[in-house]
Image (cartoon, rainbow, N blue to C red):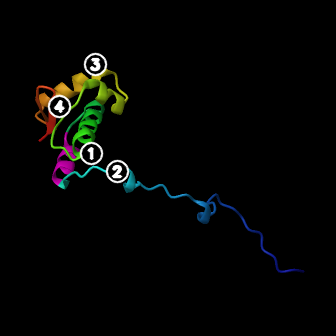
Amino acid sequence: MTNTAKILNFGRGNFAEQERNVADLDDGYARLSNMLLEAYSGADLTKRQFKVLLAILRKTYGWNKPMDRITDSQLSEITKLPVKRCNEAKLELVRMNIIKQQGGMFWTK
């Protein structure tokens, strides 16, 4: 009789082979104050409004600008929403006083 054991695989896999997916900060990042992040996290926004808000934050804070001229087509490209829906969500955010608009310039409060 030999002393052998049968090894059972319960689906846990080989931990040494797992690839870790982490954000690459060398690829860029947007500095956003914790106060704004917490306020936006708690805001009662639709999915569409939130996507447009994130796109505006990316086009402003992502480039270290307090405000920027942002077209609806730029928002559409980032959010993958139709241009018309981006415009509607953007105007809703202005009415909700979450973002400010003057001409084509937009910024967050």
- Left or right of 20? Residue 26 is left
Measuring from the top left, give residue 80's x and y in whole percent. Answer: 37, 29
Looking at numbered disc 2 in the image, what kind of residue is underneath it?
A: Gly
Q: Image quarter for residue 51? A: top left
Give SS at disc 4: helix
Q: Report the span colored magenta.
A: 35-43
Looking at numbered disc 3 in the image, what kind of residue is underneath it?
A: Lys
State if disc 2 and disc 1 touch (CB < 8 Å).
yes
- The residue wearing badge 1 is 62
Please identify the quadrant where the N terminus is shown: bottom right
Image vertical order of residue 72 relative to residue 52, above or below: above
Real-space Cα separation, disc 3 to disc 1, in angstroms:
24 Å
Looking at numbered disc 4 in the image, what kind of residue is underneath it?
A: Leu
Give SS at disc 1: helix
- The residue wearing badge 3 is 84
Image vertical order of residue 1 relative to residue 92, above or below: below
Q: Residues within 10 Å of mark 1 (few under 14, many from 20)?
A: some
Residue pictured at 19% horizontal, 55% vertical: 34
Looking at numbered disc 1 in the image, what kind of residue is underneath it?
A: Gly
Measuring from the top left, give residue 14's x and y in whole percent. Answer: 63, 63
